[in-house]
Image (spheres, grey):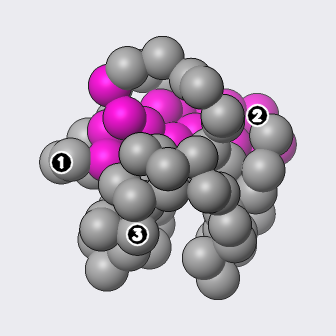
Amino acid sequence: MPIIGKIKGIILRMFFGDHAPPHFHATNNEDEGLFKIDDLEMFKGDLSTKDQKKVKKWAEPRKSKLKDMWDTQNIENLD
């Protein structure tokens, strides 16, 4: 479960060979959300609206790198 980033108590991960659609996971102490890379919308989970906004703000400038990591499975920390 490689960590690709951290945002104020939220850990971001991408899993090798995970299911479609291309996505990454965001977890805090209690909740988790799965975010599609193409539009950064949470499609599964219970992450708060406040934390969803933090994740989207972090991910927006990194969308092309996130897509590349998904396609190549060369996963790295983007902080």
Q: Residue furthest left?
A: 39
Q: Is residue 7 above or below residue 72?
A: below
Pointers 1 and 2 in contact (CB under 8 A)?
Answer: no
Residue under the image location 18 percent in, 48 percent down: 39
The image quarter in which residue 35 lies: top left
- Disc 2 marks which amino acid? Glu
Cα distance, mark 3 to mark 2? 27 Å
Pointers 3 and 1 in contact (CB under 8 A)?
Answer: no
What is the span of residues highlighted in magenta in the rendered image? Answer: 21-37
Q: Which image quarter holds the C terminus?
A: bottom right
Residue under the image location 31 percent in, 65 percent down: 63
The image quarter in which residue 56 lies: bottom left
- Disc 3 marks which amino acid? Lys
Residue on which the image places disc 2: 30
Cα distance, mark 3 to mark 1? 14 Å
Q: Dot 1: few (<14), some (14–19), or many (≥20) neighbours within 10 Å? A: few
- Can residue 74 be spotted in the picture? yes
Residue under the image location 50 percent in, 50 percent down: 72
Name the foreground residue: 59 vs 46: 59
Q: Is residue 68 found inside the magenta-colored segment of the image?
A: no
Residue 32 % position (x, y) = 62, 32
> Who comes first in sequence, dot 1 or dot 2?
2
Query: Is 54 left, or right, of 26 in this rendering?
Result: left
Residue 25 % position (x, y) = 58, 40
Name the foreground residue: 57 vs 47: 57
The secondary structure type at the circle numbered 2 is loop
Residue on which the image places disc 1: 39
Q: Which image quarter holds the N terminus?
A: top right
> Who comes first in sequence, dot 3 or dot 2?
2
Residue under the image location 41 percent in, 45 percent down: 71
Residue on which the image places disc 3: 65
